[in-house]
Image: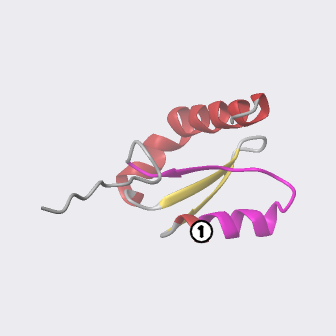
Amino acid sequence: MQTTQDGRLINRGKRLYKTKLKALLEPHHKGEYVAIEPDSGTYYLDHTMSEAYERAAAEHPDKLFYLARIGYRAAISFKHRTSL
């Protein structure tokens, strides 16, 4: 279950991405991942979500991050496969 603190983190991360980072990152980094530290606005790019998170956590071990896939609506997607 999502807590109020989680909701605030998500909202602040989304807002930072939308207002400051989207135009900057999407032209050259589509498909990469970004970890955003909402308090400072610091962000970390990498080719995988885990690498972006690890870079961010190495510099801010006591912080939480908003993770996004640049140019996509969701960082992770699941496809349902049916067998016939």
User: Residue at (69%, 69%) from the top-left corner?
Assistant: 55
Q: What residue type is labelled 1?
A: Ser
The colour style of the image is: secondary structure
Q: Does the magenta stretch include residue 69?
A: yes
User: Residue at (63%, 39%) from the top-left corner?
Assistant: 13
Q: Tell me if residue 6 comes above or below residue 35 in the rendering.
A: above
In this rendering, position of residue 13 left or right of residue 82: right
Expressed as whole percent of the image width and height from the top left, the position of residue 46 reads: 53, 68
In this rendering, position of residue 75 left or right of residue 10: left
The foreground one among 48 and 78 is 78
Mark 1 element type: helix
Q: Tell me if residue 65 comes above or below residue 45 in the rendering.
A: above
What quarter of the picture does the C terminus occupy?
Answer: bottom left
User: Residue at (72%, 36%) from the top-left corner?
Assistant: 6
What quarter of the picture does the N terminus occupy?
Answer: top right
Q: Mark 1 points at which residue?
A: 50
Q: What stretch is highlighted in magenta?
A: 52-71
The foreground one among 4 and 38 is 4
